[in-house]
Image (cartoon, rainbow, N blue to C red):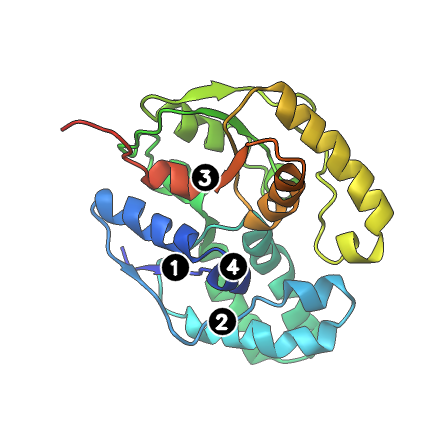
Amino acid sequence: MRIALFVTCFNDTMFPETGKAVVTVLERLGHSVEFPLAQTCCGQMHFNTGYRPEAVPLVRGFAQAFAGYDAVVTPSASCAGMVREYHGVLARQSGDPGLERQVAEVAPRVYEFAEFLVDVLGVTDVGAFFPHRVTYHPTCHSLRGLRLGDKPFALLRAVRGIDLVELPGADSCCGFGGTFALKNAETSTAMLGDKMRSVVTTGADVLCAADNSCLMHIGGGLSRLRTGIGTLHLAEILASTEGATR
Protein backbone atom coordinates (compact mmCIF):
# COMPACT_ATOMS: atom_id res chain seq x y z
CA MET A 1 0.00 0.00 0.00
CA ARG A 2 1.36 3.41 -0.97
CA ILE A 3 0.74 5.78 1.95
CA ALA A 4 1.25 9.54 2.10
CA LEU A 5 1.33 11.76 5.18
CA PHE A 6 -0.77 14.93 4.99
CA VAL A 7 0.72 16.71 7.98
CA THR A 8 -1.47 19.88 7.63
CA CYS A 9 -0.10 23.41 7.76
CA PHE A 10 -1.10 23.83 11.42
CA ASN A 11 0.77 20.75 12.59
CA ASP A 12 3.75 21.45 10.37
CA THR A 13 4.07 24.95 11.84
CA MET A 14 3.07 24.43 15.47
CA PHE A 15 3.20 20.71 16.31
CA PRO A 16 5.68 18.91 14.01
CA GLU A 17 6.17 16.10 16.55
CA THR A 18 2.64 14.92 15.78
CA GLY A 19 3.48 14.25 12.15
CA LYS A 20 6.61 12.40 13.21
CA ALA A 21 4.52 10.31 15.60
CA VAL A 22 2.19 9.23 12.78
CA VAL A 23 5.18 8.01 10.78
CA THR A 24 6.63 6.26 13.84
CA VAL A 25 3.45 4.27 14.42
CA LEU A 26 2.93 3.32 10.78
CA GLU A 27 6.56 2.26 10.36
CA ARG A 28 6.29 0.20 13.55
CA LEU A 29 3.36 -1.58 11.90
CA GLY A 30 5.49 -2.34 8.84
CA HIS A 31 4.44 0.42 6.45
CA SER A 32 6.53 3.02 4.69
CA VAL A 33 5.24 6.57 4.50
CA GLU A 34 5.92 9.20 1.86
CA PHE A 35 5.78 12.95 2.35
CA PRO A 36 4.85 14.87 -0.81
CA LEU A 37 6.76 18.14 -0.58
CA ALA A 38 4.22 19.97 -2.74
CA GLN A 39 1.52 19.76 -0.07
CA THR A 40 0.22 22.97 1.48
CA CYS A 41 -2.98 24.06 3.27
CA CYS A 42 -6.22 22.19 2.53
CA GLY A 43 -8.12 25.51 2.35
CA GLN A 44 -10.24 25.02 5.45
CA MET A 45 -9.48 28.49 6.83
CA HIS A 46 -10.50 30.15 3.60
CA PHE A 47 -13.62 28.01 3.18
CA ASN A 48 -14.84 28.53 6.75
CA THR A 49 -14.35 32.28 6.50
CA GLY A 50 -16.28 32.59 3.24
CA TYR A 51 -13.40 32.86 0.76
CA ARG A 52 -14.47 30.00 -1.46
CA PRO A 53 -12.87 31.13 -4.76
CA GLU A 54 -9.57 31.68 -2.94
CA ALA A 55 -9.72 28.10 -1.61
CA VAL A 56 -9.96 26.52 -5.08
CA PRO A 57 -6.21 26.77 -5.89
CA LEU A 58 -5.50 24.98 -2.61
CA VAL A 59 -7.96 22.23 -3.52
CA ARG A 60 -6.22 21.89 -6.89
CA GLY A 61 -2.81 21.77 -5.26
CA PHE A 62 -3.96 19.11 -2.80
CA ALA A 63 -5.39 16.87 -5.53
CA GLN A 64 -2.18 17.14 -7.51
CA ALA A 65 0.16 16.59 -4.56
CA PHE A 66 -1.60 13.44 -3.38
CA ALA A 67 -2.56 11.89 -6.71
CA GLY A 68 -1.66 8.23 -7.05
CA TYR A 69 -1.58 7.28 -3.38
CA ASP A 70 -3.64 4.42 -2.01
CA ALA A 71 -4.15 6.28 1.26
CA VAL A 72 -3.51 9.80 2.53
CA VAL A 73 -3.26 9.82 6.33
CA THR A 74 -3.58 12.95 8.44
CA PRO A 75 -3.46 13.61 12.20
CA SER A 76 -6.31 16.11 11.88
CA ALA A 77 -9.98 15.25 11.92
CA SER A 78 -10.89 18.77 10.85
CA CYS A 79 -8.63 18.74 7.78
CA ALA A 80 -9.69 15.22 6.82
CA GLY A 81 -13.30 16.37 7.04
CA MET A 82 -12.55 19.43 4.93
CA VAL A 83 -11.05 17.36 2.13
CA ARG A 84 -13.67 14.62 2.12
CA GLU A 85 -16.75 16.80 2.60
CA TYR A 86 -15.96 20.09 0.90
CA HIS A 87 -13.22 19.71 -1.69
CA GLY A 88 -15.80 18.18 -4.02
CA VAL A 89 -18.16 21.09 -3.37
CA LEU A 90 -15.48 23.63 -4.23
CA ALA A 91 -14.42 21.68 -7.32
CA ARG A 92 -18.01 21.68 -8.62
CA GLN A 93 -18.43 25.38 -7.92
CA SER A 94 -15.19 26.12 -9.78
CA GLY A 95 -16.75 24.90 -13.04
CA ASP A 96 -13.65 22.84 -13.83
CA PRO A 97 -14.62 19.24 -14.74
CA GLY A 98 -10.97 18.19 -14.66
CA LEU A 99 -10.62 19.34 -11.08
CA GLU A 100 -13.83 17.54 -10.15
CA ARG A 101 -12.40 14.30 -11.51
CA GLN A 102 -9.12 14.80 -9.66
CA VAL A 103 -10.86 15.47 -6.36
CA ALA A 104 -13.20 12.50 -6.83
CA GLU A 105 -10.12 10.28 -7.16
CA VAL A 106 -8.16 11.63 -4.20
CA ALA A 107 -10.65 12.80 -1.54
CA PRO A 108 -12.16 9.38 -0.66
CA ARG A 109 -8.65 8.08 0.07
CA VAL A 110 -8.01 10.66 2.80
CA TYR A 111 -8.20 9.23 6.32
CA GLU A 112 -7.89 10.63 9.80
CA PHE A 113 -5.16 8.71 11.62
CA ALA A 114 -7.36 6.75 14.05
CA GLU A 115 -9.84 5.67 11.37
CA PHE A 116 -6.99 4.58 9.12
CA LEU A 117 -5.54 2.37 11.86
CA VAL A 118 -8.86 0.83 12.88
CA ASP A 119 -10.89 0.75 9.66
CA VAL A 120 -8.20 0.26 7.02
CA LEU A 121 -5.39 -1.57 8.79
CA GLY A 122 -7.68 -3.33 11.27
CA VAL A 123 -5.34 -2.53 14.17
CA THR A 124 -6.01 -1.29 17.69
CA ASP A 125 -2.86 -2.41 19.53
CA VAL A 126 0.06 -0.49 18.02
CA GLY A 127 2.60 -1.51 20.67
CA ALA A 128 2.39 1.71 22.71
CA PHE A 129 3.30 2.16 26.37
CA PHE A 130 2.22 5.32 28.21
CA PRO A 131 2.01 5.05 32.03
CA HIS A 132 -0.08 8.15 32.73
CA ARG A 133 -3.64 9.12 33.58
CA VAL A 134 -5.25 10.30 30.33
CA THR A 135 -8.62 11.71 29.35
CA TYR A 136 -9.84 12.11 25.76
CA HIS A 137 -11.67 15.08 24.23
CA PRO A 138 -13.62 14.16 21.06
CA THR A 139 -13.29 17.29 18.95
CA CYS A 140 -16.34 18.50 17.04
CA HIS A 141 -14.97 17.47 13.65
CA SER A 142 -14.01 14.01 14.89
CA LEU A 143 -17.28 13.50 16.73
CA ARG A 144 -19.86 15.06 14.41
CA GLY A 145 -18.04 15.33 11.09
CA LEU A 146 -16.06 12.13 10.65
CA ARG A 147 -18.04 10.25 13.31
CA LEU A 148 -14.97 8.49 14.65
CA GLY A 149 -17.03 7.08 17.50
CA ASP A 150 -15.15 4.57 19.63
CA LYS A 151 -12.09 4.28 17.37
CA PRO A 152 -9.79 6.57 19.40
CA PHE A 153 -10.88 4.86 22.61
CA ALA A 154 -10.19 1.42 21.16
CA LEU A 155 -6.67 2.55 20.36
CA LEU A 156 -6.12 4.18 23.76
CA ARG A 157 -7.50 1.21 25.67
CA ALA A 158 -4.86 -0.99 24.02
CA VAL A 159 -2.00 1.23 25.24
CA ARG A 160 -0.04 -0.50 27.98
CA GLY A 161 0.26 1.27 31.33
CA ILE A 162 -2.38 3.89 30.56
CA ASP A 163 -5.04 4.95 33.05
CA LEU A 164 -7.84 6.10 30.74
CA VAL A 165 -10.58 8.13 32.43
CA GLU A 166 -13.84 9.44 31.02
CA LEU A 167 -14.21 13.17 30.38
CA PRO A 168 -17.50 14.63 31.72
CA GLY A 169 -19.43 16.52 29.08
CA ALA A 170 -17.08 15.16 26.47
CA ASP A 171 -19.40 15.96 23.55
CA SER A 172 -19.44 19.71 24.26
CA CYS A 173 -17.34 22.02 22.08
CA CYS A 174 -14.18 23.51 23.57
CA GLY A 175 -14.90 26.87 21.96
CA PHE A 176 -12.06 26.98 19.46
CA GLY A 177 -13.72 26.55 16.06
CA GLY A 178 -10.86 28.18 14.14
CA THR A 179 -11.68 31.82 13.46
CA PHE A 180 -14.74 31.48 15.76
CA ALA A 181 -12.39 31.93 18.72
CA LEU A 182 -11.18 35.22 17.24
CA LYS A 183 -14.51 36.61 16.11
CA ASN A 184 -16.44 35.54 19.21
CA ALA A 185 -13.77 35.71 21.89
CA GLU A 186 -16.07 36.07 24.89
CA THR A 187 -18.29 33.14 23.91
CA SER A 188 -15.24 31.06 23.05
CA THR A 189 -13.65 31.80 26.43
CA ALA A 190 -16.84 30.84 28.28
CA MET A 191 -16.98 27.52 26.42
CA LEU A 192 -13.30 26.96 27.16
CA GLY A 193 -13.95 27.55 30.85
CA ASP A 194 -16.60 24.81 30.92
CA LYS A 195 -14.30 22.40 29.10
CA MET A 196 -11.35 23.10 31.40
CA ARG A 197 -13.46 22.48 34.50
CA SER A 198 -14.44 19.10 33.10
CA VAL A 199 -10.82 18.22 32.33
CA VAL A 200 -9.63 19.20 35.81
CA THR A 201 -12.27 17.02 37.51
CA THR A 202 -10.82 13.89 35.88
CA GLY A 203 -7.51 14.21 37.69
CA ALA A 204 -5.78 13.44 34.41
CA ASP A 205 -2.13 14.14 33.77
CA VAL A 206 -2.74 14.47 30.04
CA LEU A 207 -5.60 15.58 27.81
CA CYS A 208 -5.66 13.83 24.43
CA ALA A 209 -7.52 14.59 21.18
CA ALA A 210 -7.39 14.03 17.42
CA ASP A 211 -6.95 17.74 16.60
CA ASN A 212 -4.04 19.85 17.81
CA SER A 213 -6.02 23.02 17.13
CA CYS A 214 -8.44 22.19 19.94
CA LEU A 215 -5.61 20.95 22.15
CA MET A 216 -3.79 24.26 21.65
CA HIS A 217 -6.92 26.15 22.73
CA ILE A 218 -7.61 24.01 25.80
CA GLY A 219 -3.93 23.58 26.64
CA GLY A 220 -3.37 27.31 26.60
CA GLY A 221 -6.13 27.79 29.15
CA LEU A 222 -4.92 24.93 31.34
CA SER A 223 -1.41 26.34 31.27
CA ARG A 224 -2.50 29.84 32.24
CA LEU A 225 -4.39 28.36 35.20
CA ARG A 226 -1.26 26.37 36.14
CA THR A 227 -3.21 23.13 36.38
CA GLY A 228 -0.19 20.99 35.55
CA ILE A 229 -2.26 19.09 32.96
CA GLY A 230 -0.47 18.55 29.67
CA THR A 231 -1.88 17.96 26.20
CA LEU A 232 -0.83 15.38 23.63
CA HIS A 233 -2.20 14.38 20.26
CA LEU A 234 -3.49 10.82 20.03
CA ALA A 235 -0.68 9.95 17.60
CA GLU A 236 1.98 10.96 20.12
CA ILE A 237 0.54 8.71 22.81
CA LEU A 238 0.31 5.84 20.32
CA ALA A 239 3.93 6.43 19.28
CA SER A 240 5.14 6.38 22.87
CA THR A 241 7.06 3.44 24.31
CA GLU A 242 7.98 5.37 27.46
CA GLY A 243 9.53 3.12 30.05
CA ALA A 244 8.60 -0.05 28.19
CA THR A 245 10.81 -3.08 28.78
CA ARG A 246 11.70 -5.40 25.94
Q: Position of residue 205 (x, y in %)?
A: 50, 27
Q: Position of residue 82 (x, y in %)?
A: 61, 57
Residue under label 4: 14
Amino acid identity at mark 1? Leu
Using the rendered image of the protein, determine whether residue 144 is visible from the camera's viewpoint: no
Residue count near mark 3 (Cα–Cα under 10 Å), binned few <14, some 14–19, many ≥20: many
Checking the image for residue 34, the label placed there is none
Checking the image for residue 63, the label placed there is 2
Residue at the spot 61% in from the left edge and 31% down from the top edge: 227
Q: In the displayed structure, would residue 218 be above or below residue 198?
A: below
* Location of residue 38 by image quarter: bottom left
Of mark 3 and mark 2, the one earlier in the sequence is 2
Amino acid identity at mark 3? Leu
The front one of 195 and 84 is: 195
Amino acid identity at mark 2? Ala
Instruction: Kindly check if marks 2 and 1 are in contact, taking CB atoms under 8 A apart as contact.
Output: no
Residue reaching furthest left?
A: 246
Instruction: Kindly check if marks 2 and 4 are in contact, taking CB atoms under 8 A apart as contact.
Output: no
Amino acid identity at mark 4? Met
Residue at the spot 85% in from the left edge and 52% down from the top edge: 184
